[in-house]
Image (cartoon, rainbow, N blue to C red):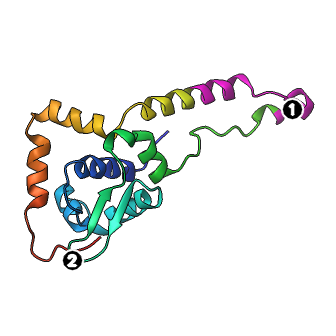
Amino acid sequence: MKLSGGVEWALHCCVVLTTATEPVPAARLAELHDVSASYLAKQLQALSRAGLVQSVQGKAGGYVLTRAPARISVLDVVTAVDGATPAFVCTEIRQRGPLAAPPEACTRPCAITRAMSAADAAWRAALAAISVADLAADVNADYGPATMSTIARWLATPQDGASGA
């Protein structure tokens, strides 16, 4: 399974938003991550539609998390950006070809579907067990305890022309 690049950007934005005390404009998040503002806006809109972030309008507008970072899982973000479709979708290959099994012989998922479904469930459970707060703590652990506070200070520094969601 390959996740879209939008998942990575959305996760980074959620981690950064854990430091924000005021709404953060999309343009500011794009600048921080050196990514196109229009591309990042699509990811932020997906997070907003999923209820993970809220867009605040106006001169001091931008994006904020809608709940505590400990209550937003990595799976929540993945699902918001890429959807909930399983990585594997069975097409009932066993019912094709010269030795095809008849539909009445296929009353339960085949071994391949069971294995792939179990792997998908394990992957989703692992992502559900990691919160955005966990990721933010890991950033500090990986890069030093001042990392997230440095990001917060950078976000709080006024920028010319930065406005709105």
Disc 1 designates what residue? 98
Label 1's element?
loop
- 109 part of magenta stretch: yes
Q: Position of residue 28 (x, y in %)?
A: 19, 64
**Front position among marks 2 and 1:** 2
Please name the amino acid that badge 2 sits on.
Lys
Disc 2 designates what residue? 59
Label 2's element?
loop
Q: Nearer the viewer, residue 31 or 103?
A: 31
Q: Mark number for residue 37?
A: none
Please name the amino acid that badge 1 sits on.
Pro
Q: Is residue 63 above or below residue 77?
A: below
Would you say 144 lies left or right of 28 here?
left
Would you say 2 lies left or right of 140 here?
right
Disc 2: CA contacts within 10 A as few (<14), some (14-19) or many (>=20): few
Q: Is residue 114 above or below residue 37?
A: above
Residue visible at 44% across and 56% down in the picture:
51
State the extent of the magenta-drawn residues as a range. 95-118
Q: Position of residue 45 (x, y in %)?
A: 40, 63
Q: Is residue 69 above or below residue 95?
A: below
Would you say 29 lies left or right of 47 here?
left
Q: Position of residue 15 (x, y in %)?
A: 26, 46
Residue visible at 9% across and 56% down in the picture:
154
The CA span between labels 2 and 1 is 67 Å
